[in-house]
Image (spheres, grey):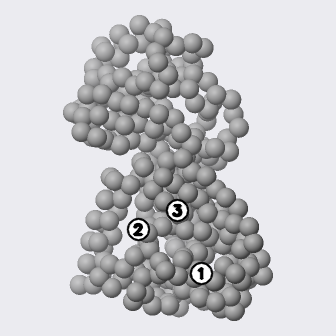
Amino acid sequence: MKKTLSLVLVIILSLALLSACAPSSTDTGTQTQGGETGINTAKTEKGELYEQINGGDYLMGDPSKRDIFQVRHSPYKLIYTYDELVEAAENANNIESSVFEENAVLYIVQEFGAIYGKPIGFNDLKMIDGAPFITYTLYRYDNEDASDAICYHEDYIVIPKSSVPDGMYQTGVIGVIQNEIALEVPQAVNVVEESALPINSAYVLKTKDEVNEFAAAYGLEKTITPGYKEIVIAICVRRPKREYYGTDSYQGYIYKRDGSTLEISYLYEENENSEWETYIEFIRPYVASANITEATVDVKEGQNPVPNVGTHSMN
């Protein structure tokens, strides 16, 4: 019964996070060096992701110790003192003891059956019906293929002591709610030196004839056509030049529906140093779009990962 309840909670929370939080949680991200404590933080418009430290392999890198934690259920350990960190983490000497003045360190192991996406960070540690949960955000491409390999993510997350929920044990298993933010790449791209269309404008096209008329009006060679119960969005943007959308960096479009309006954002990596160009490009949104009558678009920096995560090792 408890397992069933936990599964239902995870599904409900995951759907809520994907529908309500995903687009806004990827707003402009900045990162700052943590100075004397040797920790880092990343901020979003919705608040801060938890800081993380590079603790290395828990229990001095002995992988056999993972078995006692039932890794597939995301075991955790709360570390409250620097002495406990020294006993547990091989890289403890790189961390200043002052981190524990106002914080605890939450160590989590996650097991994945495949490798995909780009980890961003953790937030929202809470108790639900007596069980701890935390949200783990990552980017992935909408059509990304996963690499088939068992891997373990071992993360050391800095939690303010005031944010550790009442009733949370020092060790146990934790529900990790994955907030996967799907990025969609443009499906037909036209580079234009100058555009008769306003920059950051979007146009809803519902039929093949509408697409062809739009393309002819602006001299565009590359287009796509709507599918069954689908629409096409034509977008004029100025964004970083990107010819290949691979997993070396994650860039692309995300969507948020507001009634009959589709709010679109192109997210790019702030560390990407490529030149900017003007594009008129077409996308076929994967969201339910039958009643969409207009669209808006903007271009902004995506969220950088919280640095200094622990180890992401493979078996």
Return the residue nearer the eye: 53 or 251: 53
Distance (Cα) linking label 2 and label 1: 26 Å
Task: State the image coordinates of residue 3 (x, y, percent, origin top left).
Answer: 30, 81
Contact (CB < 8 A) between labels 2 and 1?
no
**Where the C terminus falls, by quadrant?**
bottom right
Give the residue drawn at x 49%, y 80%: 162
- Under circle 1, the secondary element is loop
Give the residue drawn at x 78%, y 82%: 93
Give residue 60's mark.
none
Give residue 48's mark.
3
Give residue 177's mark.
2
Task: State the image coordinates of residue 295 (x, y, percent, origin top left).
Answer: 34, 30
Res. 43 image quadrant:
bottom right
Distance (Cα) linking label 1 and label 3: 16 Å
Q: Residue furthest left?
A: 291
| Disc 3: CA contacts within 10 A as few (<14), some (14-19) or many (>=20) | some
Q: Is residue 90 left or right of residue 72?
A: right
Q: Amino acid at mark 2?
A: Ile
Q: Residue furthest right?
A: 93
Distance (Cα) linking label 3 and label 2: 17 Å
